[in-house]
Image: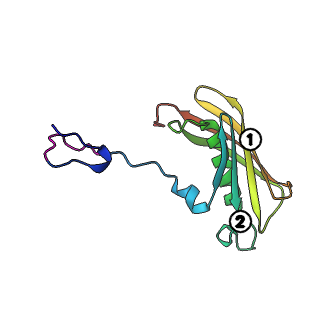
Amino acid sequence: MEEYDEDEGPQPGNEREAQPRPPARVDGFVALLGMQFEETAPDHARVRLTIGAEHLNYAGMLHGGVLATLIDSAIVRAARGSLATTRAATTDLNVTYLRAIRRGTIVVEAWLLRRGRAIAMGEAEVLNGRGELLAKGRASVLLGGDGSLE
């Protein structure tokens, strides 16, 4: 019997049926916003965003929802660590906005305060290019180690 590479699909004369592959996991929302994960380590993550016109609110300031999303994403990534198979979902998110920004690059540093078997609690700070604090956030994250959050 002739063998084949699964990436190439079945070859003529092969008696095995091709097994469907699950779709690759891609976080389209991260790509849409333009977030760049610079560092992911156990209990820590760093995210960078270059502010564009698409991130601004009607007053020309960075939209608060973008900051909340960055904080949420960074804390969840810190909770997941380097385990790409661990799923996680935010159960509580608190954001304190301290300073507005119109342009430039912002960095979010997130770290875990506590990790339990099912819940992790994290904190994050958002800084502008001069190191000024723009926002702080805290989140609780439900960890689904088996890949399901049902």
Which quadrant of the figure has residue 141? Answer: top right
Q: Secondary structure at mark 2?
A: loop
**What is the C-alpha distance between the residues marked 1 and 2?**
22 Å
The residue most toward the top is 117
**Disc 2 marks which amino acid?**
Ile
| Residue 65 position within the rendered picture, expressed as x and y whole percent measured from the top left | 67, 59
Position of residue 13 in the picture relative to residue 135 (left or right)? left
| Residue 29 position within the rendered picture, expressed as x and y whole percent measured from the top left | 55, 57
The residue nearer to you, when weighing 93 against 100, is 100
Look at the picture and state if 94 lies above or below 81: below
Please give the name of the residue rendered at 59% of the width and 25% of the height, measured from the top-left corner: 117
Disc 2 target residue: 51
Choose the circle earlier in sequence order: 1 or 2: 2
Judged by its main secondary structure, the magenta piece is loop
Disc 1 target residue: 123
Total numbered labels placed on residues in the image: 2
Asked if the magenta segment contains residue 30, the reply would be no
Look at the picture and state if 112 lies above or below 32: above
Asked if the magenta segment contains residue 14, the reply would be yes
Front tag of 1 and 2: 2
Residue density around tag 2, few if under 14, some if 14–19, many if 20 or more, within 10 Å: many
The residue nearer to you, when weighing 93 against 77, is 77
Look at the picture and state if 89 lies above or below 117: below
**Disc 1 marks which amino acid?**
Glu
Q: Secondary structure at mark 1?
A: strand
Please report the bounds of the magenta region as a residue range.
13-20
The C terminus sits in image quarter: top left
